[in-house]
Image (cartoon, grey):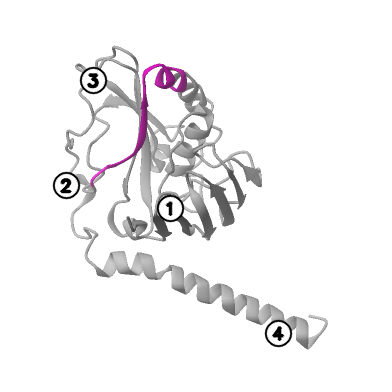
Amino acid sequence: FSSPALLKKFVMLLAGTLFLILVLLTGPLWVYLSGQLDLKTHWSMAKRESTKTAPNPKEFKPALVRVYYARSFNWRGAFGAHTWVALKDEGAPDYQILQVMGWRLFSSLSTVDQHSGNPDRYWYGEKPMLVGEITGSQAGQAITRIREAATNYPYSGKYRIWPGPNSNTFVAYLMRSAGNLSFALPPTAIGKDYPVKGEFLSRPPSGTGWQLSFLGLLGACLSTVEGLRFHLLGLEFGWNPLKSEFYWPGVGILSYR
């Protein structure tokens, strides 16, 4: 550093950043200490049953697209969530599930998992939450674009839990590709802001507003759907006055209606 004043500014900036990170970590710490996580059950024994909350595909005939999330398994749930997409063609008797799982690289060349099944199953003990859905002709159009995007996902052979590309990077990519899934992924979906094409400025997953993201490590978003959000090292916080919601790392969505 060329001067003491410049060094002082750098030290203050560094100290401020570290302090902000410590404040943001209060969310994951609260989730951990409040007993919201199952840290004892082995993954092979964790609950995976259907919650019976998705429409029965044999009774519900229109096309349907649903996006889900659930807390990640074990200690990772203090920080993040896993997301997936469920598709049902018009008149189809079952759902197609699309998601990314890193462990698939041990037995396959692709992290992308596509299979038929119940979209509303517990995610290794964690209850699934519905992000949003569309039905009818809009869903039919989105399904075509989503399947094409899943086939051409550029990171099918790579997985990195933080800052991405991971399962949330994949779902955010599918949502942007669909173009009409105007709902927001939760702030705990770490990796959703990872730039698939390396872009610094892009649309958020909802397709509304704009977001800035530097390698998924630092960024901001302004949208009528996502609200005003900032993320630092994957820890996202913000506010959406239109939905009466605050966002905090680990905790996720705090509604004050």
In the rendered image, the quadrant that contains the C terminus is bottom left
Amino acid type for the residue under numbered disc 1:
Pro
Give the quadrant of residue 7. bottom right
Q: Which residue is mark 2?
A: 45
Residue 28: x %, y % from top left: 36, 65
Which numbered disc flags the more N-terminal residue, 4 or 2?
Answer: 4
Residue furthest out toward the top: 91
Amino acid type for the residue under numbered disc 3:
Pro
Q: Tell me: residue 86, above or below residue 23.
A: above
Residue 244 appears in view? yes
Question: In the rendering, which numbered label is found on residue 256?
Answer: none
Q: Is residue 40 left or right of residue 26?
A: left
State the CA–CA distance, disc 3 to disc 1.
30 Å
Residue 160 in the magenta stretch? The answer is no
Which numbered disc flags the more N-terminal residue, 2 or 1?
Answer: 2
State the CA–CA distance, disc 2 to disc 1.
28 Å
Which numbered disc flags the more N-terminal residue, 2 or 3?
Answer: 2
Which numbered disc flags the more N-terminal residue, 3 or 4?
Answer: 4
| Label 4: how many Cα within 10 Å (few below 14, some 14–19, many 20+) | few
Residue for point 54% across, 26% down: 152
Q: Which residue is mark 1?
A: 187
Amino acid type for the residue under numbered disc 4:
Lys
- Circle 2: element type: helix
- The magenta stretch is 127-142
Q: Which residue is mark 3?
A: 57
Q: Which residue is mark 4?
A: 8
State the residue in front, 191 or 58.
Answer: 58
State the residue in front, 183 or 171.
Answer: 183
Q: Tell me: residue 224, above or below residue 256.
A: above
Mark 1 near mark 4, Cβ–Cβ under 8 Å?
no
State the CA–CA distance, disc 1 to disc 4.
34 Å
